[in-house]
Amino acid sequence: MRTSVGRSCGVQSSPHVVVIGNQKGGSGKSTFAMHIIVALLKAGKRVASFDLDLNQLTLTRYLGNRHEWDRKHEQKLELPDHYPVTEEVHGATLRRFISRLKKIGRAHKHDFIVIDTPGGVQHLSLIAHGMADTLITPINDSLVDLDLLVVMEQSDLEPQPSAYAKAVWRALDARRKVSGRTADWIVVRNRLESVESSNQHQITQVLDVIQRTVGCRVARGLLERPVYREFFAAGLTVLDPIEGFKSVAVPARFEVQSLIREIGLIDEADVEDEACPETEPEMAGANAEANDLVADKEDLSEETNKRAVTLVPALPTGS
């Protein structure tokens, strides 16, 4: 677990900027952003948020759904101070974004700024990457998606950083030269299989090489769980105490809390743990049943495994 970046009491400083970035769509950026925002708010942090995805505005709609649920059910759900970017005007959008960030910084009313970025390579998104104190890149757990970070091809050459990785390097290097501050770049695995497979083990090996190549660190993220998608329409997260969803929300809540600890944005004591003791036997039983399936589950043939290894040289071929 990383040391918390939370600020000491009475110390005035600029808000810590968390950017959720990945040029590929469908990687779960907005889901990660929402859960990080709610985790920070539940830890008593003051949070401002930006949605830079002009086309989809998923985080903005997620928060809108949350506000509506809060109004109907009077649950007093935590909400950030949100600033959507709703239209693209040449030059004006960037100026407004920078202006709002400066106002937030001068006001000293927020501890964190969380910025959700769109897929694709956009100028505004790259600017946001360069502002990150913590850059989180969610990535689906597949070799196809790892191509986002390095060029995945069968070759005897060393793996080469992708266009996106190079763009991130340039943005973070420019930040370091201007402000003298470094950024913590974290690649978070997403949509993990619930049962450990050959594919999952293979990706772990590849990521071990990738993190040394592109200069990031890797965190185990979230399993493939329908609850993350189903809660969107209500604006809820697995961190919210919602009646009737305990059996599906509690295991997911454990893994989100574990991820928040690993990222290191808040202190261990500030990560809320509302799980009920009576759910633990159910979770233990489910885990035991899942483990029993491992021996029978073969996602990749031996031949496919060997081929996958050759995509990134110097990986061990043993398990």
Image (tube, rainbow, N blue to C red):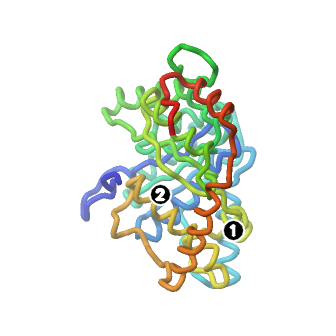
Q: Position of residue 245 (x, y in %)?
A: 65, 79
Callout 1: SS: loop
Q: How far apart are the alpha carbons under marks 1 and 2?
A: 19 Å
Residue shown at 30%/53% (left/top)?
3
Instruction: Point out the image quarter for the N terminus.
Output: bottom left
Residue for badge 2: 259
Give the percent coordinates (x, y) of residue 141. Answer: 62, 44
Q: Amino acid at mark 2?
A: Leu
* Amino acid type of the residue that numbered disc 1 sits on in the rendered structure: Phe
Say which quarter of the image contains residue 52. top right
Q: Position of residue 111 (x, y in %)?
A: 39, 58
Callout 2 secondary element: helix
254 horizontally vs 246: left or right: left
Position of 319 relative to 215 (above/below): below
| Front of the two marks 1 and 2 | 2
Q: Which residue is mark 1?
A: 231
Viewer-proximal residue among 38 and 123: 38
Q: Percent position (x, y) of residue 40?
A: 45, 63
Along the line of sight, which residue is nearer the eye, 104 or 151? 151
